[in-house]
Each structure stands twice: as C-alpha cells, then as structure tokens.
Image (cartoon, grey):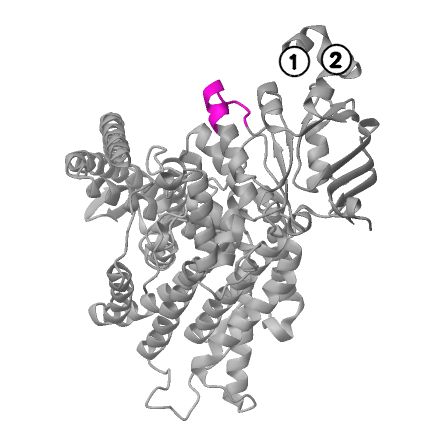
Amino acid sequence: MSDIADRVALELRDVRKRFGKTEIIRGATLKVNAGERVALIGPNGAGKSTLFNLISGRFAPSSGEILLGGARIDGLAPHRINRRGLARSFQVSNLFTHLSVFENLRCAVLWSLGYRYAFWRFLASLRDANERAEEVMAMLRLERRRDVLAMNLTYAEQRALEIGLTIAGGADVLLLDEPTAGMSQSETRRFLQLIREVTAGKTLLTVEHDMGVVFGLADRIAVLVYGEVIAFDTPEAVRADPRVQEAYLGAVDAQGLA
Amino acid sequence: MTERAEPDAAPGRPKQGRLPLGGVDGVPAGRGAVTYHFRPYNVGRWLTWGGYALVLLLAPLVFSSSLSQTLLSQMGIAIIACLSYNMLLGQGGMLSFGHAVYSGLGGFLAVHALNKVGAGTLHLPVSLVPLVGGLAGLVFAALLGFVTTRKSGTTFAMITLGIGELVYSMSLMLPEFFGGEAGITSNRVVPPAVLGISFGPQIQVYWLIALYCFACTALMFAFTRTPLGRMLNAVRDNPERVAFIGYDTQRVRWFAFMIAGLFAGIAGGLAGINFELATAEVVGAQRSGAYLLFTFLGGSTAFFGPIIGGVLMVLATVVLSELTKAWLLYLGFAFVLMVMYAPAGVAGLVLANLRLAAFGRLRALLPGYLALALAGALAFTGASAMVEMLYHLQLNEALGPVMKFGGVMLNAKGAAAWVGAALLLAVGATAFEAVRRRFRVRWDAAQAEIERELKRREGT
C-alpha cells in the first residue's frame, strides 16, 4: 500500500442501501483521511443517519464496501466494528439510564482495556479503567455529577455524557450524530469547544445541521443529497459550489451560508 | 480494602430495574439516599455481612421448634433461588418464566447423586451434593440459555416459558430420570457420620443450608461488582448502546444466565437434600412463577430485595397456606398492589423510608403511616371476613354455617355478619382513601424538600 492509502482512516466505496424498494443510499463514496474532521451535511431525508448506521454496523449495506483503516467492515456486527476502533454517538442520547455518570463511563472503557466478560475481578480494583473513567469525566466537566444517575442529568449534561461514552474507549475514528441537537446558541458554542478538546487527534465524521458548528469544526464538508455525496471539499469550496447551492441549500439558505 | 468505594458499594443501593421504579409515588427509591463513602476498613460492609451471618446463626436458636427449623431451612433455599432469579430480572432486565427449570434439574441431579452416594457408587460427601445440583444448573443453563438469551424482552420471556413447559412435559416422558408422578426419593443419611454430622436431624441440614446461603449470597453480591456484572446492568438499561461500546449483548446475557443457573442449581440441590425428594413440580411453571412473584415482592431493584422475597415465599406458601384456604387470593391481591404502588418491592419501601429518615423527614410522616395502617386494617378485616365466609360456604358447608374468624364466631349465612363485614370494608376503604390523599401530599412535600437539600449540597 502506498503512503496515501495508509492515511485513509475511513473509506466508502459505492455504498448502497435499500429498504424494500426504496433506495436510501445510492452509491455513496467518501474518503476520510486520518486526523481529519469532516462534517456531513444534507437536507432532511438525504440519508445522513442511515449512512451512519451503515458505517457503525447497525445495518448492513445492500452493496458496496466500507473500509476502516484499509480493512473491510461492512456487514460486521456493531460490537466488532467498535473493537476495530470506530465509535459513534447518537442523535437522541443513548445512555445507561439507571447507572451513574461514572458507571456509564467505566462501562464504556472496559472492553478497550481488555476486561471483556470478566467476573473474577472487582471493578474497584481495575485501576486503569477507573482512572480512564475519571479522566473522561473531568474532560466532560461532569465530576460534580459523578454519582448522579444518567436519567437525572440535565439535557446538556446528557449530551456531554453521550460524547463521553463515544470517546471513552479510545476509538480513533468517531462518528458524531448531531452532537449539538436541541441545544441553545450559547450551549452549542461551549459544547463545540468541548468536542474539539475531547476529539483532538482523532478522525471525526459528524452530522450537523447548525452551519455555525459545521464551519467552526470541519476541515472538509461532505454534502449528501438523495443518498449520494455530491460534493466533498473545504468549507469555502463547498460554499461556492453551485451544485450544492442548487441541490441542497436553495437560494435563500445560500445567502445564510455566504 | 483500600480502594475507593463507589456509592453502590452498599448492598442497599437500589439497582433500579427496567420495571417502572419509584419509591411510593414515582420517586426514584434511594436516589442519592445511600451515598456511603467508606473509610478504608469499610465498616459498613463488615457490619452488614456480619449482621447477615449473625441472623443466619441465631435464627434457629431463637426459633427452635421443629416447625421453625423446617421453615428456616426452606427460607435459606428460597433466598438463594430468588437471588439467582434476580440476576436475570433485576440486574439483567430478563423476565424469565422458566427459572425453576434450572433449580429443578439441579434438584433431580442432586437427588440422583445422593442415591449413588448412598449406594456407594459415588464417593462424595453429602455436604457437597448441592454442588452437583449447581453444576447441573450451570450446564443446562449453558445449553438452553444459548437459545433463550439470543433474544431479549418479550421474545426472551416467551422462549423461557416454552422451555419451561418443554422440560415439564419431559418429566412425564422420562420416568427413569424424573420418577414419574411420585418423583425420585432419596435418603440424605449416609453412614458413617463425619464429626457427628449425619444430616439426620433437621438442624444439621439447616446449618448446611445456612452455610451455602451465606456463601452464595456473598458470591452473588460480589458478581454485581465485576465487569460482567456491571455490563449486565448496562445491557438491561440499553442493549443497543452496549453493542457500540464493544460488547456482544447476547454473550453478556448468556454468561449471566449461566451463572444464575449455577446458583439456582445449588438451591435445587439443597432442596433435594432437605426434602429427600424431587418431583416434577420442582421444574414446573408454578415454581417459576413463584420465583418471579416473590423476587418482585421482595424488591428486584435492590440486591437484598430477593432475600426478603425468599423469606416471604416460605411464609406465604407454608404458613399463610395453613392459615387460610384463600391464601392465593390474598397473595395475588398483595402482588397487584405492589406492582401498582410500590414497584420497587419491600426493599424499595425500606430504602425510601431510610432515605426519609436520613434527611430527618420520617418522623413527620409517622402519624400518617399509623392512620394508613389503621384504616387499611379496618378495610382488610372487612374484606377478608367476606372472603373467608365465602370460602367457608363453598368448601366447609358440612361443618355448618358458623365459623371462627379471628376469635369471633360468624354466621356465614346470616345477614348480620355480611352487613357488618361490608360496613367495615366501606368505612375502612373510605378512611384509607382520605388518609392516603393527605399522606401523599406530605410525602411529595418531603421528597421535594430532600431534592432541594441535595441541590444545596451539590452547590457547596
């Protein structure tokens, strides 16, 4: 393999997904380099969430290939994909509701530290797991809420914990599905800073509706329309792309963009 | 232990299940209630376990009649069985309708092993025969659980029900193993007695059961603090997310199912020694249902709930059933009330009140509790008088219409008794409802006050 191929963290080759007769993803192709931050944008119903579900293994693609670090992962179960170093967050917080913040995070680090299904060791004696969970909790600024059950957290705190569960296992490739969904402007700004911090050095693919977030976070933007990636370039180039303006943004939104 | 102890280090912390939880009125029982920060030597834990051992030790000395010894032995067995069942229900969110399969098959294997020991073809101390039951429970849980745990939720429940029926019907098809209608009998006394322990007297069997009960409780509690034990909670809360943090949810459920089967088998093996008998009913749906019902009544969201459940199980099936023929009716009624008003079971009620006490708010509620109890007793007396009269008329007619009810003679065919009972019920129920409404207001106020207090503490 050439140097360039080695640096591709995540690649989609003509990925298609049909539900019944409807083809939702129609030949999506994408190459995300290691360490790059890519925002996936597109109008409602373009298939962004479906694409995330295909990459993370929730669904298997109907055809096409998905490669993680050069190895195929399409059709694998989610836990196998996760073990290969890809983690995702959810648009609607998907937490362990009856466990505390700390327990949530500790669960998320156990596999990556090799504890598997151990029932012969006490959690309290797993120094590295406890330290890692504390460390992530500090990054999320949730130390004060350490023992609060996830279901009793505020909305913003739940969003933070959602990100925490995603990054805790140390995956190199992260998929974030609308991390700032439902947040106020000021919350979004703070949260964006948090995401930048906790994902430093990682490969990031994020679905986002908030254009402020998109331009503030992304190195490159991929535009998904009707299940196809119609543009994939730097924010400036995408902003200027007439196809994007026509197909996705429409005249009114394009002004907002510019 | 020098490690930092999490708040759940206390056995009392509610492991809240999937079941809609809520102290009495939807208040999460014990949220922030039992936040123990243990000192290095972990006094709280030593006290808890020391107290548990002490109860097991002193119980047969305090209740020394032969009936008590029988009851206590059965309680020890039921505690292990309910705790193992709660690994599935409370900790794993797996509603099994077939847990008796594993305790029951453990029981059969143990009885067969005991017979072989008696015949001299198997060299094993009688005290280790329960482990044969445990091994059987483990093996069958591994085999059958591989199928059941592939699914969760309703499908899981249905499959366990089906497997329960399957195994029960096998018991009639394979009389060599299950002994047909009569079951398999055995004799736990295998001479020579070691150190004077022959397991002839019931008290010696009790000590064996108590020992196993303590060890199994400790092991099952330890399990809740291991990676697999915690991931089981995670699978209960959100199986989907578990897959995205690297775990195979089916594996987690399967392994936990096997461990639950192991302890269920030990309980079954102890029952085999205790009764010197295993019949088809020990694998039956009724036994499985009893595990579910009493584990829930005891409280599936706290680790110690099923211990209460095991005790209740014996009290209800042995004592209550002696007192009244209508015992199943009372039990069903209690179960429905519990599901509706206190889904965290007795343990949840205990924890909710401990929490109130910890914040100094229990005393103010005591008059309310007293009023509730009085009104409830009134209504219950009226209702149960009618139930008992009805049962008397249906089942004991030959004895004439007059029956004894709580020290009073009632004429079950006389209008006076019925009117009186109905009046008691009406007055009691009305009073109960009135008191309940007031109580609820005070309860909610106390809970709100505690929440405010917690917020204040968090702020400082």
Q: Which residue is depicted at the point 56% across and 49% down? A: A169
Q: From this viewpoint, which residue is outermost toward the front?
A: A3
Cβ–Cβ under 8 Å for marks 1 and 2: yes
Image coords of residue B435 (percent x, y): 22, 28
The reply, left or right, for residue A250 in relation to residue B406 is: right
Image coords of residue B190 (percent x, y): 44, 88
Q: Amino acid at mark 2?
A: Gln
**Placement of the N terminus of chain B among the 4 image quadrants:** bottom left
Tell me which label, 1 or 2, sits earlier in the chain: 2
Whether residue A240 is situated above or below residue A106 in the rendered picture:
above
Q: Which stretch appears magenta? A: A180-190
The residue at which mark 2 appears reads as A245
Q: Which residue is depicted at the point 53% across and 91% down? A: B120
Secondary structure beneath dot 2 equals helix
Secondary structure beneath dot 1 equals helix
Category of crowding for the residue at label 1, using alpha-carbon neighbours closer than 10 angstroms: few (below 14), some (14–19), many (at least 20)? few
Q: Which residue is depicted at the point 67% across and 10% down? A: A253
Q: From this viewpoint, which residue is outermost toward the top?
A: A252
The residue at which mark 1 appears reads as A257
Identify the subunit bearing mark 2: A
